[in-house]
Image (cartoon, grey):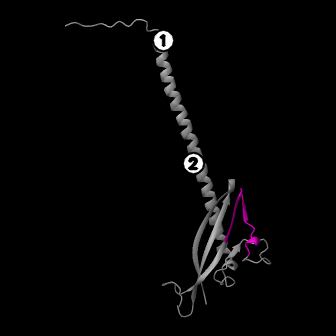
Amino acid sequence: MQILAINYKDQNGSATLLALMVLSLLTIMGLSGARTGSVEMEIAGNDTLNKLNFFSAEASRAYVMMNPDVYGAGNIDSGTPHFFPLNDPANDDPTNPANVAPFNMGNNQSFSGSVQYTGPTSPPRASGYDTSSFRAHQYAMTCTGSGPRNTSQQIRAGFYRIGL
């Protein structure tokens, strides 16, 4: 049996080449990590804007609950939405969208919306209201929340009020 011995001569620079290859690999990994971090920051920023707009639209829903003039007896004309908030609630026509002045919540957030009467129906079962004496007046509301960077989000919801 014969053993061959290989004698490498002239290996000058092989350590430098190996170091350059490892450095190149580490540089590519670092750039990839930086890019991933940048994308993650954009995603987090967009998520924050989305949440701000959603909360603005939710504030719009609370505004409707606190202002029965938007959904009260004055809004029982099917097919004619009432817009809110108005520039001058005492004098402006709520059916004209040009009279809307979005409610400024600060921090570049605002909301506006509309409530439309969709018709009467019987009160829901177990609501405690006599179906021969009371009606459930159904409404559809569209709430728009606006936020920084000209972003917005809409929420559509239905509700009813009990009346005669």
Q: Position of residue 104 (x, y in %)?
A: 73, 63
Q: Position of residue 31 (x, y in %)?
A: 55, 33
Q: Earlier in the sequence, mark 2 or mark 1?
A: 1
Q: Is residue 107 magenta?
A: yes
| Residue name at image x 49 percent, y 19 percent | 19
The one nearer the camera, 107 or 154, is 154
- Label 2's element? helix
- Label 1's element? loop
| Residue at the extreme left of the image, as rendered | 1
14 on left or right of 138: left
Q: Which residue is mark 2?
A: 43
The one nearer the camera, 108 or 127, is 108
Q: For the C terminus, give its image quadrant.
A: bottom right
Q: Which residue is mark 1?
A: 13
Can you say whether 128 is above or below 89 in the image? below
> How many residues crowd around disc 1 within 10 Å: few (fewer than 14), some, or many (20 or more)?
few
Q: Which residues are magenta?
A: 96-113
| Residue at the extreme bottom of the image, as rendered | 132
Can you say whether 142 is above or below 46 in the image? below
Name which residue type carries label 2.
Ile
| Residue name at image x 66 percent, y 84 percent | 77
Place residue 38 in its image quadrant.
Answer: top right
24 on left or right of 110: left
Q: Is residue 48 magenta?
A: no
Q: Nearer the viewer, mark 2 or mark 1?
A: 1
The one nearer the camera, 147 or 5, is 5
Place residue 151 in its image quadrant.
Answer: bottom right
| Residue name at image x 57 percent, y 90 percent | 134
Name which residue type carries label 1.
Gly
Q: Position of residue 142 (x, y in %)?
A: 62, 70
Report the disc number at residue 163: none
Place residue 121 in its image quadrant.
Answer: bottom right
